[in-house]
């Protein structure tokens, strides 16, 4: 098994092509669709690098695997599906995320919340094949309810569950996120052999160091700055809750989730031929019609 890594500097996202050099069978994990929020313009520079590699290597791309419905970048899964006939797969609890965001974006009753936009919904504990590649599914909710990690050979691809040991874990303050769930998910990862290679979904280059993407379960257990093997659930939940309370929303939260819950499809064209993204106004803090913030109701004493 070989792994080729692509790093998107604009979103700090890591995309992986996992392939068997002998059979040329391959999958892509978490590909990026470029998006400029100021111009409201999509682009394909990032995913074209992946496409070029797949073609030059003569790979047969079976699946585009999504670790979750990302909140920091748009998925380019449909680009790869159109060009290679690959199936798009995600964890089966994407239905929970779809239900949540159908209401937030007012997508209407016609928007399916059964996961049918994806070609395959993956169950915790199942193993499926992409040609000669055997892929194990580990449900790792917490960052979102639908997060999964993929175990392929001696490697596990963790998405936003855990990052490199000097970066910690994913945030848990998105709708239906849970620090308790994430703690339990990481314990499942920590039960893997220490020598298991870990490939993360992002690298924010703390301290300005060079970009990295690979570590091991043993290193994470010993050195993860937010959650080692010795960290208690109470300690982690307290830390994560306090940290998440002061984090700003991801810059591409609304465009990303809106597209990604629909399996990477852009919104349908309106009657005028134009596509539009819906941006909920003042979602995190209600306001009057003139923009004046509405104070939160005072909590009752006792």
Image: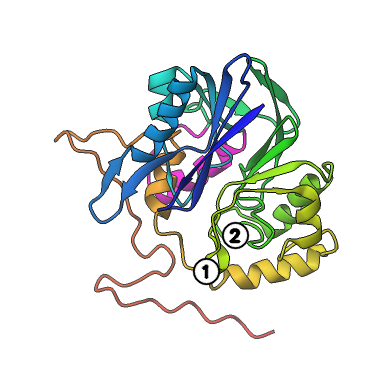
Q: Position of residue 31 (x, y in %)?
A: 47, 37
Residue depicted at 31% across the width and 77% down the height: 292
In depth, the one of 87 and 222 nearer the eye is 222
Please report the residue visible at 44 percent of the width from the left and 32 percent of the height from the top: 50
Work out which quarter of the rendered image holds the N terminus and state it.
top right
Picture layout, residue 168 above or below residue 260: below
Q: Where is residue 126 in the image (x, y as percent from the top left)?
A: 73, 26
For label 2, the SS is: loop
The kind of secondary structure element at disc 1 is loop
Q: Which residue is drawn at 39% across and 69% down?
A: 286
- Residue 182 lies, in percent from the top left, at 70, 54
- Which numbered tag is attached to residue 156? none
50 left or right, relative to 123: left
Q: Can residue 234 be seen in this view?
A: yes
Residue 18's place in the image compared with 159, above or below, is above
Residue 247 is labelled as 1
* Residue occupied by mark 2: 171
Residue 164, given in percent of the width and then of the height, sits at: 65, 55
User: For the residue carrying disc 1, how many other residues have a C-alpha within 10 Å: few (<14), some (14-19), or many (20+)?
Assistant: few
Residues in magenta, as a range: 92-113
Quadrant containing the C terminus in the rendered view: bottom right
Q: In this view, does 130 lie to the left or right of 298?
A: right
Mark 1 vs 2, N-terminal side: 2
Look at the image and say whether residue 101 sits in the magenta stretch.
yes
> Could you tell me if the residues under marks 1 and 2 are in contact, i.e. CB atoms within 8 Å?
yes
């Amino acid at each position: 098994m070989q792994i080729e890594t692509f790093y998107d500097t604009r979103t700090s996202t890591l995309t992986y092509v996992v392939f068997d050099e002998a059979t040329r069978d391959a999958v892509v994990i978490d590909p990026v669709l470029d998006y400029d929020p100021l111009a409201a313009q999509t682009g394909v520079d990032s995913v074209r690098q992946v496409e070029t590699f797949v073609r030059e290597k003569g790979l047969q791309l079976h699946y585009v695997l999504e670790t979750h419905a990302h909140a920091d970048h748009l998925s380019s899964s449909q680009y790869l599906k159109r060009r290679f006939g690959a199936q798009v797969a995600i964890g089966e609890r994407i239905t929970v995320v779809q239900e949540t965001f159908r209401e937030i974006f007012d997508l209407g009753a016609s928007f399916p919340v059964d996961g049918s936009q994806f070609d395959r919904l993956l169950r915790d504990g199942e193993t499926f094949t992409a040609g000669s590649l055997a892929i194990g599914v580990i449900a790792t909710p917490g960052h979102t309810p639908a997060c999964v990690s993929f175990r392929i050979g001696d490697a596990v691809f963790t998405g936003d569950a855990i990052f490199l040991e000097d970066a910690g874990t994913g945030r848990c303050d998105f709708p239906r996120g849970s620090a308790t769930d994430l703690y339990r998910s990481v314990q499942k990862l920590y039960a893997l052999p220490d020598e298991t290679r870990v490939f993360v979904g992002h690298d924010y280059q703390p301290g300005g160091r060079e970009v990295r993407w690979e570590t091991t379960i043993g290193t994470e257990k010993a050195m993860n700055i937010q959650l080692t093997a010795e960290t208690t659930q109470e300690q982690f939940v307290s830390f994560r809750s306090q940290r998440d309370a002061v984090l700003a929303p991801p810059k591409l939260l609304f465009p990303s989730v809106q597209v990604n819950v629909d399996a990477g499809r852009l919104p349908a064209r309106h009657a005028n031929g134009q596509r539009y993204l819906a941006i909920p106004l003042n979602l995190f803090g209600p306001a009057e019609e003139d923009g004046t913030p509405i104070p939160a109701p005072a909590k009752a004493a006792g």
